[in-house]
Image: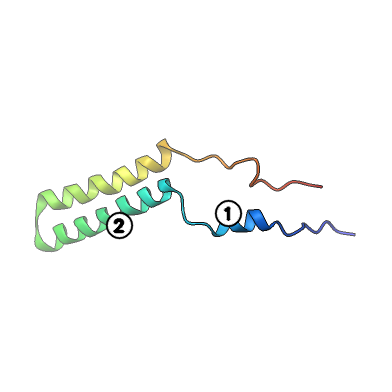
Amino acid sequence: MPFLPRYDRDRARRLRAEPSWLTQLKLGLAIAGIIMWGYGARADVNWLRWAGIVFLAASVAVRFLFRQRPSPEDEPHDE
């Protein structure tokens, strides 16, 4: 008989929960960077274009600097 995992209510609730503060930070920086870069390119405002690029770079840096490790509870386990 093949292994069929049991439904874990707590794990499903955690997966449906709101994103972490780190994910919200990355998304906020990326969206702000895209908006600033786009408006700077459209209006030919050089400093705003560069500020958008800095925000995009910061969102990428946050991704690699504060990498989240999966908790042992989220990893699949055999019972």
Q: Which of the 4 image quadrants contains residue 2? A: bottom right
**Relative image position of residue 14 (x, y in whole percent):** 58, 54
Count of marks overlaid on the render: 2
Amino acid type, residue under disc 2 in the picture: Ile
Q: Residues within 10 Å of mark 1 (few under 14, many from 20)?
A: few
Q: Residue at x 63, y 47 (%)?
A: 74
Give the structural element (helix, strand or loop) at label 2.
helix
Closer-to-camera residue (6/61): 6
Question: Which residue carries the number 2 mark?
Answer: 31
Residue at (11%, 48%) from the top-left corner? 47
Q: Work out which residue is located at the far top of the displayed protein and give it.
A: 65
Give the number of the mark in front: 1 or 2: 1
Q: Position of residue 49 (x, y in %)?
A: 16, 52
Above-or-below relation of 63 to 24: above
Rendered residue at 52%/57% (across/down): 17
Q: Residues within 10 Å of mark 2 (few under 14, many from 20)?
A: some
Which residue is disc 1 drawn over? Answer: 14
Nearest to N terminus: mark 1 or mark 2: 1
Classify residue 79 as left or right of residue 62: right
Residue at horizontal 32 percent and vertical 53 percent from the top = 28
Cβ atoms at labels 1 and 2 below 8 Å apart: no
Q: CA distance from mark 1 to mark 2?
A: 25 Å
User: Does residue 74 appear left or right of residue 30 in this picture?
Assistant: right
Q: Which SS class for mark 1?
A: helix
Report x, y in % for residue 13: 60, 58
Quadrant showing the N terminus: bottom right
Tell me residue 5's x, y (percent): 77, 57
